[in-house]
Image (cartoon, rainbow, N blue to C red):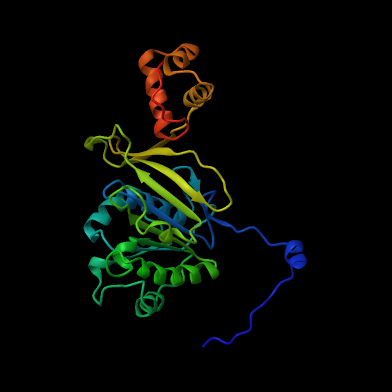
Amino acid sequence: MDASPLTYHSARALAAAAFPPRPFILEPLLAAGSAGLIYGPAGVGKSFLALGLAMAAASGGSFLGWTARRPHTVLYLEGELGAVELQRRLALFGPPPAALSFWLNDQNTGPRLDLASVEGIARLMSSWQRPELLVIDNRSCLAGRGLDPNRWVELGHLVSERRRKGQSVLMVDHANREGAVRGGSRSVDGMDLVMALRRPRDWCPRDGARFEIHVEEICGGRAFDPIVAQLCTDAQRPHWQWQSLRGPAIDRAVALLRQGLGAEAMGKAMGLSRTSAYRLQRRARQLGWVADRNQGA
């Protein structure tokens, strides 16, 4: 039983205290000592996103506009992909940084790693060199059996302790059949960052790794416009392209639609064709920026 005394602070002392701001692992997305979750349907590109963020953090580089000011030590726990596929994906990001290490489930020689058990956490920490960022890909594979949310509560003890130590944890998980986060709100309790990946409505198989990123929650309330990102492999060297889903055209369209104009009236005011106007209206409704009403033009 832990009998260590608790420390209390008066409200005045707390209000007057000068706490230093938390540094960022990836600015302005992921701060030190924070916990994040990436979720989305199978095959959408979650591991690509997590790997890109890990590479940027470990190299002191940038990925999709999020930047690390210096290299950070990163440990990536891969519970699903095999070594051959992971090696192929690594090559798409360029030379691997020295500060990035991996644990791969398919190369594991001992019992299956279970991060929702005391024994599993002890195994992890016995030789991990205390990374600044721990990536868990994915939560369902590495937190034990099936979809039992009680297992994620146990995993939460590991996450909370890492945050208290100033380390960051980024987890990956599949969405449920409805496209929402597995386990409901209970499974994202305490998360500083929640990112949802979705397939663009016009996605086709030849697009490969192309997905929308929606920042649903972030500590501090900073707003991030959703972006669409794509891995382009048609050049000599693979590279990523991304752009905001909210550009000047859709901003203007949203403003006019909110004034009560229909799609054709909005398009006329903006000098757009009827087809372009309806496309902007449909996109604004899909993103939830205007009400989805059955209204005429």
248 left or right of 173 in image: right
Splitting the image into 4 quarters, where does residue 280 fall? top left
Residue 160, image x, y percentages: 49, 69
Residue 22, image x, y percentages: 60, 59
Residue 261, image x, y percentages: 49, 18
Residue 140, image x, y percentages: 31, 63
Residue 83 showing in the rendered view: yes
**Where is the C terminus found, in terms of image quarters?**
top left
- Does residue 73 sit above or below 90 in this rendering? below
5 left or right of 226 in image: right
Residue 98 showing in the rendered view: no
Give 54 or 15, whichever is nearer the viewer. Answer: 15
Q: Residue at x 30, y 50 (%)?
A: 91
Give 256 or 98, whichever is nearer the viewer. Answer: 256
Give 26 or 182, whichever is nearer the viewer. Answer: 182
Splitting the image into 4 quarters, where does residue 104 fall? bottom left
Q: Residue at x 36, y 65 (%)?
A: 149
Total marks placed: 0
Q: Residue at x 48, y 58 (%)?
A: 191
- Does residue 120 sit above or below 1 in this rendering? above
